[in-house]
Image (cartoon, rainbow, N blue to C red):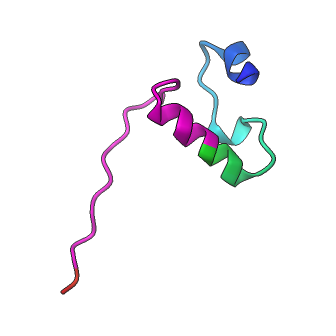
Amino acid sequence: MEFLIHSYPKFVSVGSLPCDSFDNKMSLAKVLFERGLVRTSEPLLPHEQPPHSQ
């Protein structure tokens, strides 16, 4: 969190987060985004759902 506080108001990439692994960086970014604590520099597009197979 300190990294993000000191980076504000600049946007930083998920890859630059000071975590041990990429999975941890993604998990942290996801949790913070879902709770409205961070935002993206560009609007996110909704994921397209693949057609259901029958």
Q: Residue at x 73, y 14 (%)?
A: 6
Asked if the magenta segment contains residue 4, the reply would be no
Q: Residue at x 42, y 31 (%)?
A: 42
Quarter of the figure with the N terminus: top right
- Whether residue 38 sits left or right of residue 50 in the image: it is right
Asked if the magenta segment contains residue 37, the reply would be yes
- Is residue 52 or residue 45 the one in the foreground? 52
Q: Position of residue 5 (x, y in %)?
A: 68, 15
Q: Is residue 41 above or below residue 23?
A: above
Q: Is residue 54 above or below residue 36?
A: below
- Is residue 44 or residue 33 the one in the foreground? 33
Quarter of the figure with the C terminus: bottom left
- Is residue 45 or residue 34 the one in the foreground? 34
Q: Which residues are magenta?
A: 28-52
Q: Which corner quadrant of the image does residue 16 belong to?
A: top right
Q: Residue at x 21, y 76 (%)?
A: 52
- Whether residue 47 sits left or right of residue 53 in the image: it is right
Q: Is residue 21 above or below residue 34?
A: below
Q: Main secondary structure of the magenta part?
A: loop
- Whether residue 22 sits left or right of residue 39 in the image: it is right
Q: Residue furthest right?
A: 20
Q: Which corner quadrant of the image does residue 13 belong to?
A: top right
Q: Residue furthest bottom?
A: 54
Q: Position of residue 35 (x, y in %)?
A: 47, 30
Please state the total of marks drawn on the protein image.
0
Q: Position of residue 46 (x, y in %)?
A: 30, 47
- Is residue 38 or residue 42 the one in the foreground? 38
